[in-house]
Amino acid sequence: MITVLGILYVTAVSLLSLFGLLGLYTLWQYWRHRHDTFPCPVVASEPLPPVTVQLPIYNERYVVERLIETAVHLHYPADRLQIQILDDSTDDTTRQAADLVARYQAEGVNIQLVHRDNRQGYKAGALAAALPQATGDYIAIFDADFQPPAEFLRQTIPHFLQEPDLGMIQTRWGHLNADQSPLTAAQAIALDKHFAMEQTVRHRANLFPKFNGAGGVWRRACLEDAGGWEDDTVCEDLCLSTRALLRRWQFRFLNDVTAPAELPPTITAYKIQQARWAKGSTQCLRKFGVQILLDSGQTMASRLYGLLSMAAYSSNLLLLLLLLLQIPLIAARYRFSPNLIVFSVVAVSQPLLFILGQQVLYPDWLRRLRHFPTLMIVAIGLAPSNGRAILQALFGHNHPFLRTPKRGTAVQTYHLAFDWIILVELFLAAYAALGIVLALRQQNLGPVLFLASCFLGLSAVAILSLRDFSSK
């Protein structure tokens, strides 16, 4: 039996090492393509093509006014700019949006409130329902937490005009509240790594690039050719971009154009966001895995990169498996081969990507990295929540779209129900603590660092979650 558990442990470590290898490959490709540039083409100011800006919202009373004000002040010819507020709200957000829309319509702004009295299809359903009323040849999308800069459209639309096969442009997400707390600072490091490193490599090396759901622009012809918005996953962005790539459309990521957004200010909001991304990525892997693998129009490197990226959240389940195996193996005094150190060396690639992401974006990158330990601790603590989401994607049938609550400058936020996953986090934290005691009694120091990391991460996330719940 113990031999079987040892085999399971080595298997889990080996699978985790695949994501370490993915990180090494990303580092290599970034080095190869680090000097690639995509300057904004110089095009005539007249005539620019018609553009529709879509703003999907659901119960966003704290940020809806800020969002609309920002969209209205985009610098683009007024006769070629349409703004759609896609509102599924059930609270006073609708009234706030309607008041602002009426005010700007009176000033001549082409802005409409598209309100649904149901959430059929959630965000994908709202985007699909509003598309027939859109007048633009290009569709820019911003979620409720975004504040795009005024020049956003002039920095993106010209790229489309000279490349007819360019179907989508994604810009880098900036951060409105990175300095609000150690939690938001840690999130900023994580997103910077994704955009500055992974998205840069995906697009420049043509390794299955993707749309991130907001802060991007679609060519309408591409969107429709790919089949439009589908609501059978909770990552409608990854679903659509995968279908567009399989239809041979080209994508571009602009690292020098930012779309600032609010980072989830509480651990509960962050858990909701990350669980949705974990579930959606897993759903897309199930939906497109075979198609991607068999797509001869993509290189094998691109196909494998796309598949491993979609599967990356499975590392949460592997981490939980490693944790659960600790006590039985420690109790049996199981000793692993020193050769396993190779897997630890491979795993260093992912931290290097986080560090390099800060170094290429900020002059004060060393100061920002003081929040890197927080990121690592929180990432471990999210394993139960993300793991549950993955299992729901694999075995569940009901997949509601849980939007990330936004706060803006408000002190309070929307009430969230107690989540039983907190009890799992507390149990696993206690389990890790028991493992530490057992390992120390046997003077087996090998597992202590991993168990201590699990204890810190799981207990920290559980305590912060309880604090969020008690403060409502």
Image (cartoon, rainbow, N blue to C red):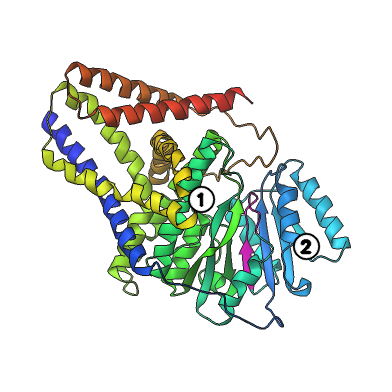
Q: Amino acid at mark 1?
A: Val
The local secondary structure at tag 2 comes to: strand
- Measured as percent of width and height from the top left, residue 237 is found at 51, 58
403 part of magenta stretch: no
Q: Is residue 80 above or below residue 439?
A: below
Left or right: residue 99 compared with residue 203: right
Q: Nearer the viewer, mark 2 or mark 1?
A: 2
The residue located at (76%, 55%) in the rendering is 69
The local secondary structure at tag 1 comes to: loop
Residue range corresponding to the magenta coloring: 138-148
* Residue for badge 2: 111
- Measured as percent of width and height from the top left, residue 436 is found at 27, 22
Q: Which mark is residue 253?
A: none
Q: Amino acid at mark 2?
A: Ile
Judge by depth and name the residue closer to the eye, 227 or 298.
298
Quadrant location, the N terminus: top left
